[in-house]
Amino acid sequence: MRAHSGMGIDMANGTARRTVAVIGGGYGGSAVAKALDEETDVVLIDPRDAFVHAAGALRALVRPDWAENIFFPYDTLLKHGTVRRGRAAAVDPGGVTLASGERIAADYLVLATGSDYPFPAKTDTDLAGDALARIRDAHAELAAAGRVLIAGAGPVGLELSGEIKAVWPEKHVVVTDPAEELMPGFLPELREELLRQLDALGVELRLGTALAEEPPSAPGRLKPFTVTTTTTGGDAIGADLWFRCYGVRSNGDYLADGRITARDAQGRVPVTERLNVVGHDHIYALGDLTDLAEAKMAGYAMKHAEVVAANVLAQVRGESPTGTYRPSPPSVLLPLGPGGGVGQVPTPDGPAVLPAEQVSAYKGRDLFTGRFAELFGITRD
């Protein structure tokens, strides 16, 4: 069983450099590793061979010619640190043990393993080449479907409906959800505008409607079916293909032994306002894995990364960490294709609804791919 040294030497001044093991190379993990790269020995641990920009995954499904834009190889992220391909099996106060048996000793740990979500919103393989092939296969199936069922009317399901309609306006898309109201917790004006745009796109929205059982075919596979609903009379819905757009799951199985912390019922980790795992001043958690009372969004994970990096660097320099994080009020940027969508952001005067033009300018046109190309030092046409 090999071990990774927990300390290096800073050749500029002869002092010991601290090792930081960042478990998970998603939005928060990649950002914090990049921020720590100059002053610490960073070891970024992830089973994948590339960062996957999940916010672009639905666009990739409908535009496979664009799909490569959501993959960013890890080998361009760090100048000094290392990326270790592997899956964390266990964590203790002094380091992390990988499924291969390799142990990586570390002075600081950052838990950034995020969450899983059904394909196509997140990829379900560790190799970028395999993920790209999976996206292209699903695109071919979707292209041949005349009627599409989307189970789940949250932001993912609605965004997927808009992406499909932007490419194939003639397809019949029906979105179901057991809830009676769209986007609870957001302003009525946002819901009204969202309903207006969905209606203009021709999306059939069926709220208060649950499927009596899942369709007999696998999600994303072309195989006509009819399913009944739990509404009075058991209305039937027929489609050629369906997608599951619900069912987020926190990725924290490596914490199951409880040596670091106990997780809540959703598998999330309790953190302090400095984003320390409760009870450990040298272990941090960020992103979807935390129990913070806010939506689980990529942008928030990257804000968490700023706080964690600042606190770790303060500790490395012998200073007291002072960075704190306050959970963000409700906000959303929900594109409906490249030119449509709705948004809500906090302002000093309270929450404000953004028009489709601003949502497109902020997110819808390129889905932030340019920002991640910069983070990974990649130039793309």
Image: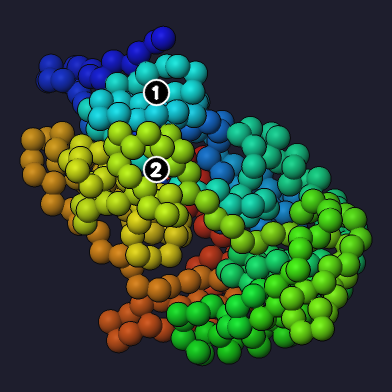
Quarter occupied by residue 365: bottom right
Disc 1 designates what residue? 97
Quarter occupied by residue 223: bottom right
The kind of secondary structure element at disc 2 is loop
Out of 133 and 70, give the one closest to the viewer. Answer: 133
Q: Pinpoint residue 171: horizontal percent, then vertical percent.
A: 85, 71
Is 205 placed left or right of 358 in the picture?
right
Is 285 placed left or right of 313 in the picture?
right
Q: Residue furthest top?
A: 1
Out of 208 and 164, give the one closest to the viewer. Answer: 208
Out of 348 and 101, give the one closest to the viewer. Answer: 101
Is 228 placed left or right of 244 in the picture?
right
Disc 1 and disc 2: Cα gap in Å? Answer: 15 Å
Q: Which of marks 1 and 2 is nearer the N terminus?
A: 1
Give me the residue at 25% from left, 38% from top: 283
Q: Of the numbered discs in the image, which one, if any, rests on residue 112?
A: 2
Q: Pinpoint residue 35: horizontal percent, then vertical percent.
A: 31, 41
Q: Pinpoint residue 362: horizontal percent, then vertical percent.
A: 50, 68
Give me the residue at 44% from left, 30% from top: 88
Q: Of the numbered discs in the image, which one, if any, rests on residue 175?
A: none
Between circles 1 and 2, the one closer to the viewer is: 1
Quarter of the N terminus within the rendering: top left
Q: Is 128 above or below relative to 95?
A: below
The kind of secondary structure element at disc 1 is strand
